[in-house]
Image (cartoon, rainbow, N blue to C red):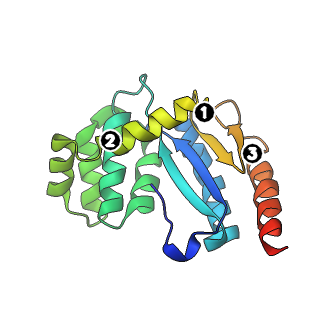
Amino acid sequence: MSDSSPARAAAPVLDVWCELQCPDCRTALDDLRALRDRYGDRLELRLRHFPLEKHRHAFAAAQAAEEALAQGQGWPYVEAVLGRVEELDREGEAFLIEVARELGLDAEEFDTALIDGRHILIVDADQAEGKAIGVTGTPTYVIGGERLDGGKSQEGLRERIEEIADRLLAGQEA
């Protein structure tokens, strides 16, 4: 899931392998918000899906996030679900549809998307790519070819991401 636009084609990319039922990913939200605030359109932030088997609703949540993106509310939806991972754990797909309704999205279309699996290929592709580059947990960040594992600790990661982003952006200006 990308918040990119054609004008941002040259922006450095921060891929964030994330899982919407992951408490560590919820913790990472503050860092992601700070990065979006600091860099705006100068850094392309891409949410990549990496549902973990230990979370039974994570795969459906990833598909729901793609449906939210299709309806124009990708990041608000992701933030709403991550902010309430305990509810997702308890209520599953009903919660995903409820969040869609709260955000004014077409909840019936969400239900249909979860049934027909229209976003499965996107989720599967993200997960396969993550495994291919060594992602084992969430959140995991990749920027400038460097992989940073946030599942072990978030400590100092935002600063490291900013160092890399600043270096990449300085290289663009040279």
Locate residue 171, reporting x and y percent. Answer: 82, 66
Check disc 3: other Cα within 10 Å, few if <14, some if 14-19, many if 20+.
some
Q: Residue at x 70, y 69 (%)?
A: 38
Q: Which residue is drawn at 63% across and 69% down?
A: 10
Mark toward the start of the polypeptide (3 vs 1): 1
Locate residue 78, reporting x and y percent. Answer: 43, 53
Q: Which of marks 3 and 2 is in front?
A: 2
Q: Residue at x 46, y 55 (%)?
A: 79
Q: Which amino acid does label 3 sit on?
A: Leu
Instruction: Name the foreground residue: 10 vs 86.
Output: 10
Label disc, if present, on residue 121 of the rendered structure:
2
Q: What element carries label 1?
A: loop
Locate residue 73, reporting x and y percent. Answer: 37, 64
Q: Distance between the residues labelled 3 and 2?
A: 30 Å
Judge left or right: residue 20 versus residue 143. left
Q: How far apart are marks 2 and 1 (CA)?
A: 18 Å
Judge left or right: residue 8 versus residue 173. left
Q: Where 99 sits versus 25, above or below?
A: below
On the image, numbered disc 1 is attached to which residue?
133
| Quadrant of res 54 | top left
On the image, numbered disc 3 is attached to which residue?
157
Quadrant location of the N terminus? bottom left
